[in-house]
């Protein structure tokens, strides 16, 4: 996470980054994605956003994304994930989408130069929530360095079957977040197996589409017991992933 208390770009000096990079190599760990969504250092989970009325706050989001691209390139991460604008503000949807587009246009050239992909992550209650909105928005961009971070639970929260949303967005998906969601569809991440998502159907469709990129757990709701949450998740997901030929 490119934010406090993890790796907030302004807090990291070159020596910090070099030490971290060496540690990753020593431990034989690979970064699959840098989460550049939250900005607790200067705001909260969503703010400053791409669509704030205050231009200086929008600039903070843009500059943060540019800094994250530099760190991703240095650490060898193929992509960063960013919020989809919002929460919505008191302006028309078209105007909000225009601001989001203008912001992305200021960061895409650097992504292309560095070979890092910017992945927009649809989320409930934000400017872009579902696969239809995401598909409509991203089709206007020609850059191969702009795509989608597919969060399985987010689509379930907005009443989409994740395996169906996969088909709509598949060509643009660069990374996948996994968690479970309760039958109520409340946006609260659960350990896989504790909610209602049909992961057999999801991985079956993922195999049929020949997905070959990375998948990671996103269980920020288990900060008090991360290891336990990880182990339980693997126990649930490993059989179904192996069933459809995905390594764990």
Image (cartoon, rainbow, N blue to C red):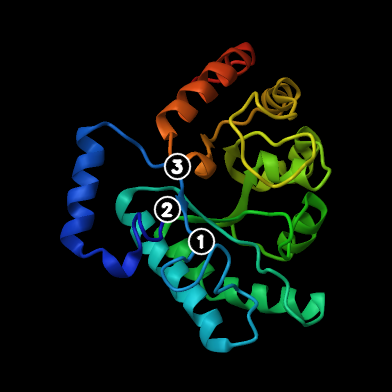
Q: Is residue 121 left or right of residue 66?
A: right
Q: Is residue 93 left or right of residue 220?
A: right
Mark linked to residue 223: 3
User: Where residue 99 sits in the image (x, y, percent)?
Assistant: 67, 79
> Which of labels 3 and 1 is toward the front?
3
- The number of discs equals 3
Question: Which residue is the site of mark 1?
Answer: 38
Q: Secondary structure at mark 3?
A: loop
Residue name at image x 78 percent, y 50 percent: 131
The crowding category of the residue bearing disc 3, from other C-alpha atoms within 10 Å (few below 14, some 14 to 19, many at least 20), is few
- In front here: 64 or 166? 64
User: Where residue 177 sits in the image (x, y, percent)?
Assistant: 58, 40
- Is residue 19 placed above or below 45 in the rendered structure? above
Q: Secondary structure at mark 2?
A: loop
User: Where residue 103 sits in the image (x, y, percent)?
Assistant: 59, 75
> Which of labels 3 and 2 is toward the front?
3
Question: Which residue is the site of mark 2?
Answer: 1
Marks 3,1: beta carbons within 8 A: no
- Is residue 50 placed above or below 134 in the rendered structure? below
Disc 3 to disc 1, C-alpha distance:
16 Å
Disc 1 to disc 2, C-alpha distance:
8 Å
Marks 1,2: beta carbons within 8 A: yes
Q: Earlier in the sequence, mark 1 or mark 2?
A: 2
- In front here: 99 or 147? 99
Q: Earlier in the sequence, mark 3 or mark 1?
A: 1
Residue name at image x 53 percent, y 82 percent: 57
Q: Earlier in the sequence, mark 3 or mark 2?
A: 2
Residue at the limit of the structure toward the front, as seen here: 224
Q: Is residue 19 left or right of residue 202?
A: left
Q: Secondary structure at mark 1?
A: loop
């Amino acid at each position: 996470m490119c934010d406090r208390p993890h790796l907030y770009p302004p807090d990291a000096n070159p020596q910090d980054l070099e030490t971290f990079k060496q540690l990753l190599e020593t431990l034989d760990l690979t970064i699959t994605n840098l989460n550049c969504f939250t900005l607790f250092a200067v705001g909260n989970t969503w703010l400053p956003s791409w669509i704030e009325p205050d231009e200086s706050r929008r600039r903070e989001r843009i500059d943060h994304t540019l800094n994250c691209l530099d760190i991703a390139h240095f650490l060898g991460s193929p992509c960063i994930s960013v919020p989809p604008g919002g929460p919505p503000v008191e302006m028309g949807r078209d105007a909000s989408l225009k601001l989001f587009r203008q912001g992305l246009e200021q960061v895409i050239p650097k992504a292309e130069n560095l070979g890092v992909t910017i992945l927009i992550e649809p989320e409930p209650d934000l400017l872009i929530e579902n696969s239809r909105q995401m598909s409509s928005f991203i089709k206007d961009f020609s850059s191969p360095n702009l795509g989608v971070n597919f969060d399985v639970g987010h689509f379930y929260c907005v009443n989409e079957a994740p395996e169906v949303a996969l088909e709509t967005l598949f060509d643009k998906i660069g990374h996948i977040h996994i968690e479970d969601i309760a039958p109520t569809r409340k946006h609260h991440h659960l350990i896989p197996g504790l909610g209602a998502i049909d992961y057999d159907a999801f991985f079956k469709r993922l195999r049929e589409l020949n997905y070959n990129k990375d998948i990671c757990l996103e269980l920020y709701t288990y900060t008090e017991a991360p290891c336990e949450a990880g182990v339980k998740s693997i126990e649930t997901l490993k059989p179904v992933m192996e069933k459809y030929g995905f390594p764990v």
